[in-house]
Image (cartoon, rainbow, N blue to C red):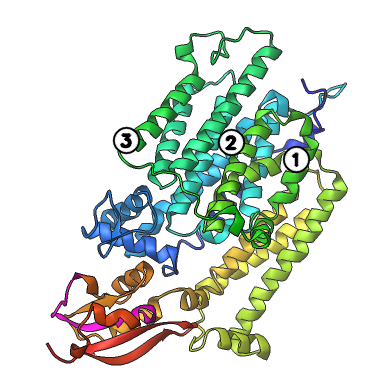
C-alpha cells in the first residue's frame, strides 16, 4: 500500500516533542490576550455586551439582544457560555469571567487539531516507506510526531492570534470545526476503538456549530467529511478483499457501523435545528461579481502564513493519494471555509475556520521536505520573527523614554493623549519570553538529531513570541487604541448621578461599552421620550434625522466626544434643558 508514498521517515526522526514543553508552549499562546485587557472594538465588545445583558436578565437566552435589539451574530451558544460564567463567578470582573470559557475553547481547538492529525497520520495510506532492512518510523510514533507538527503549524498561522483571543462566536465555531475534523479522522479507521466517544464528539460538535450560528457550515462540512470517510473505508475494505454492501464497509451489522450512526446523527441535528428555526435559508451575502480578488488573495497569503506553502507542497507530493483520508478530509474542511470566506462580508473571520485543516495538511508536507528546504524555512522564520520582536521592543523603549525620537513621535501621532505606563510584571514576562526565544534559536541551529517537527518550531515559537510581546509591552497602548473605555468614561463624567442616558444611532459595540465602562443606564430614543434621562448621546450619522425621534426643544448640545486614537469616530452629547 505504501509503494507510492512520498514519505521517507526514519524512527530517529519521529521522537516526541517533550509533553511539558508542548503544554507550556500552548499555555504561553493561550493566556496572553485573555487576561489583563479590556474588551476591544468591535465584535469583541459587542459579544461581551450581549453576555452582560443575558447575565443581568435583560435579554432572552434564546434571542440574544443588546438594549432590545437582536445581536448581529446569530446563534446563542457562545453567549450562553459567557453569560453563565459571569453569573457563576461574580467575584471576578465580568470581562475576565466571560473570557474563561473562550480560553477553554481555544485550548479545545489545539487539542482537537492534535488528535485529528494523529488519527489521520495513523491511516495506512499516510505511512512512510518501509525500509529494506528496517528502521522506518513506527506508525504510532510517526503519528505523534506529525500531530506535534500539526499543532505547531496551527499556532504559527498569523491569522489565528487576535481572532482566537476574542469572546466572539467565531472562536466557538473554530473549536467545533476542529472537533468535527477530529471526529471524521477517527471515523475513517475501520478498526475504530472508541465508537461511542467518537460519535458523541461528532454529534456535539455539529450541534454546537449550529447553535453558534453556522448551520450551513455544519451541513456542508459534515456531509463532505462523511462522504470522504465512506470512500476511504470502502477503499480500505477493497484493498483487504472484503465485500461491500452500501454503507456497510465492515463485516458487522449495519447497526453497529459508526459511519451510519454518524450520518443519522448529523441528519437528526440538522433536521431538528431546522424545525426549531435555527437553520435559516442560505444566502450569498457577497456576489462573486463584486469580490475584490486582490484583497481576498492578500488576505489568504498573510492570514494562513506559514501554512499555505506547506499545504501546496503536500498536495503536490501526495497527489497520487488525494483520495486518502489524510488528504481528502482536511482538504474538504479547508475548502468549505475558504469558499465561505470568499462569499462572506467578514472574510477574515470566515477564513479562521480553515486554519485547523490547513495546519493538518501542512504537517504532511514535513515527511517529504528536503533538508535544504527546512533550512530555508528556519532562516526566513528566524529573520522575520526576530525582526518583528526587535521592532516591538524598540517602539516600547521609545514610548517609555522618547528615544529613538521618530518611533516615539509616530506613537504620539497615532495615539494622541496616550500616557505610557510601565508595568514591572509585564516587562519581566516579555523579557523571559525573549530570553526563551533566544535559547530556542540557539538550540535550533545547534547540531543534534533531526526531528520531523523541527521545521515548525521556530515559526510557532516566533508567532507566540510576537503575540506575547504585544500582549505585554504594548498592552496599555492597545487598550487605549482599541477599547471604547476612554471615550465611555469621559461621557460618563458628563452624566448627572442617578440618571439614565438616552441613546440614538449608536452601534451595539458603543452601547455595550457605555454600559460596562461608563456604568450607565441606557434607553433607546425609539422607545419614547424617557423624561428621567438627563443626557442624550447621538451618533453623528443619525444627527440629521434626530428630530424625528427626539423633541430637540428639550435638549441643548453640550460636547463632541472623540476617541483620542481615532478622530473620525465621535459621539455627540446633549443635556436636557426642559421638560
| The residue stretch that appears in magenta | 527-542
Would you name the residue on which mark 3 appears? 275
Q: Secondary structure at mark 1?
A: helix
- Compute the Cα span from label 1 to label 2: 17 Å
Along the viewing direction, whichever of 542 and 142 lies nearer the viewer: 542
- Compute the Cα span from label 1 to label 3: 41 Å
In the picture, measured across the screen, residue 2 lies left or right of residue 466, that is: right
Q: Residues within 10 Å of mark 1 (few under 14, many from 20)?
A: many
Residue 194: in magenta span: no
* Residue 45 can be seen in this image: yes
Looking at the rendering, which quadrant does residue 539 occupy? bottom left
Question: The N terminus is located in which quarter?
Answer: top right
Residue 13, percent across and down? 77, 38
- Compute the Cα span from label 3 to label 2: 31 Å
Question: CB under 8 Å between callouts 3 and 2?
Answer: no
- First-in-chain label (1 vs 2): 2
- First-in-chain label (3 vs 2): 2
Looking at the rendering, which quadrant does residue 359 occupy? top right
Q: Which mark is residue 125?
A: none
* Residue 20 can be seen in this image: no
Along the viewing direction, whichever of 231 and 462 lies nearer the viewer: 231
Q: Secondary structure at mark 2?
A: helix
In this rendering, which labeled residue sits more in front, label 1 or label 3? 3
Residue 172, percent across and down? 45, 49
In the picture, measured across the screen, residue 482 lies left or right of residue 452, that is: left
Residue at screen point 74% across, 27% down: 127
Would you name the residue on which mark 2 appears? 116
Would you name the residue on which mark 1 appears? 314
Q: Secondary structure at mark 3?
A: helix
In the picture, measured across the screen, residue 59 lies left or right of residue 454, that is: left
Q: Relative to 123, say whether 85 is above or below.
A: below
Amino acid at each position: 500500500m505504501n509503494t507510492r508514498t512520498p514519505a521517507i521517515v526514519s524512527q530517529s526522526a519521529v521522537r516526541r516533542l517533550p509533553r511539558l514543553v508542548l503544554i507550556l508552549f500552548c499555555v504561553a499562546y493561550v493566556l496572553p490576550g485573555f487576561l489583563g485587557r479590556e474588551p476591544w472594538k468591535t465584535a469583541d465588545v459587542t459579544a461581551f455586551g450581549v453576555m452582560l445583558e443575558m447575565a443581568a436578565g435583560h435579554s432572552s437566552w434564546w434571542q440574544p439582544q443588546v438594549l432590545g435589539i437582536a445581536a448581529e451574530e446569530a446563534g446563542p451558544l457562545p453567549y450562553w457560555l459567557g453569560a453563565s460564567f459571569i453569573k457563576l463567578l461574580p467575584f471576578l470582573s465580568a470581562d475576565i469571567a466571560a473570557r474563561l470559557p473562550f480560553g477553554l475553547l481555544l485550548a479545545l481547538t489545539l487539542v482537537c487539531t492534535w488528535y485529528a492529525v494523529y488519527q489521520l497520520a495513523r491511516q495506512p495510506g499516510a505511512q512512510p516507506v518501509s525500509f529494506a532492512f528496517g528502521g522506518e518510523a513506527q506508525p504510532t510514533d510517526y503519528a505523534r510526531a506529525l500531530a506535534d507538527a500539526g499543532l505547531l503549524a496551527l499556532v504559527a498561522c498569523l491569522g489565528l492570534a487576535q481572532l482566537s483571543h476574542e469572546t466572539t462566536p467565531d472562536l466557538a465555531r473554530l473549536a467545533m470545526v476542529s472537533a468535527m475534523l477530529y471526529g471524521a479522522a477517527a471515523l475513517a479507521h475501520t478498526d475504530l476503538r472508541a465508537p461511542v466517544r467518537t460519535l458523541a464528539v461528532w454529534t456535539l460538535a455539529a450541534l454546537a456549530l449550529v447553535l453558534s450560528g453556522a448551520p450551513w457550515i455544519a451541513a456542508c462540512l459534515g456531509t463532505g467529511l462523511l462522504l470522504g470517510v465512506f470512500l476511504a473505508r470502502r477503499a480500505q475494505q477493497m484493498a483487504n478483499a472484503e465485500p461491500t454492501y452500501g454503507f456497510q464497509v465492515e463485516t458487522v451489522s449495519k447497526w453497529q457501523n459508526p459511519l451510519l450512526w454518524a450520518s443519522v446523527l448529523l441528519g437528526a441535528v440538522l433536521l431538528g435545528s431546522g424545525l426549531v428555526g435555527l437553520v435559516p435559508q442560505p444566502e450569498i451575502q457577497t456576489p462573486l461579481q463584486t469580490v475584490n480578488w486582490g484583497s481576498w488573495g492578500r488576505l489568504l497569503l498573510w492570514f494562513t502564513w506559514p501554512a499555505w506553502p506547506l499545504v501546496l507542497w503536500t498536495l503536490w507530493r501526495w497527489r497520487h493519494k488525494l483520495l486518502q483520508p489524510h488528504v481528502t478530509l482536511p482538504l474538504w474542511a479547508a475548502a468549505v471555509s475558504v469558499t465561505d470566506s470568499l462569499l462572506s462580508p467578514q472574510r477574515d473571520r470566515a477564513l479562521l475556520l480553515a486554519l485547523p485543516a490547513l495546519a493538518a495538511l501542512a504537517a504532511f508536507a514535513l515527511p517529504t521536505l528536503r533538508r535544504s528546504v527546512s533550512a530555508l524555512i528556519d532562516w526566513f522564520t528566524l529573520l522575520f520573527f526576530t525582526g518583528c520582536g526587535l521592532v516591538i521592543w524598540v517602539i516600547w523603549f521609545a514610548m517609555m523614554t522618547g528615544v529613538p525620537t521618530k518611533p516615539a513621535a509616530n506613537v504620539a501621532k497615532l495615539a494622541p493623549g496616550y500616557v505610557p505606563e510601565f508595568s514591572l510584571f509585564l516587562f519581566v514576562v516579555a523579557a523571559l519570553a525573549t530570553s526563551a526565544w533566544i535559547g530556542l534559536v540557539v538550540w535550533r541551529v545547534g547540531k543534534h538529531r533531526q526531528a520531523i517537527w523541527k521545521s515548525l518550531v521556530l515559526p510557532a515559537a516566533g508567532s507566540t513570541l510576537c503575540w506575547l510581546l504585544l500582549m505585554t509591552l504594548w498592552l496599555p497602548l492597545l487598550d487605549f487604541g482599541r477599547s471604547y473605555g476612554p471615550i465611555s468614561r469621559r461621557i460618563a463624567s458628563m452624566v448627572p448621578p442617578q440618571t439614565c442616558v438616552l441613546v440614538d444611532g449608536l452601534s451595539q459595540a458603543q452601547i455595550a461599552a457605555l454600559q460596562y465602562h461608563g456604568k450607565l443606564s441606557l434607553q433607546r430614543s425609539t422607545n419614547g421620550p424617557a423624561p428621567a434621562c438627563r443626557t442624550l448621546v447621538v451618533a453623528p450619522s443619525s444627527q440629521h434625522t434626530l428630530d424625528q425621534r427626539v423633541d430637540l426643544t428639550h435638549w441643548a448640545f453640550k460636547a463632541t466626544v472623540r476617541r483620542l486614537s481615532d478622530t473620525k469616530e465621535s459621539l455627540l452629547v446633549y443635556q436636557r434643558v426642559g421638560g
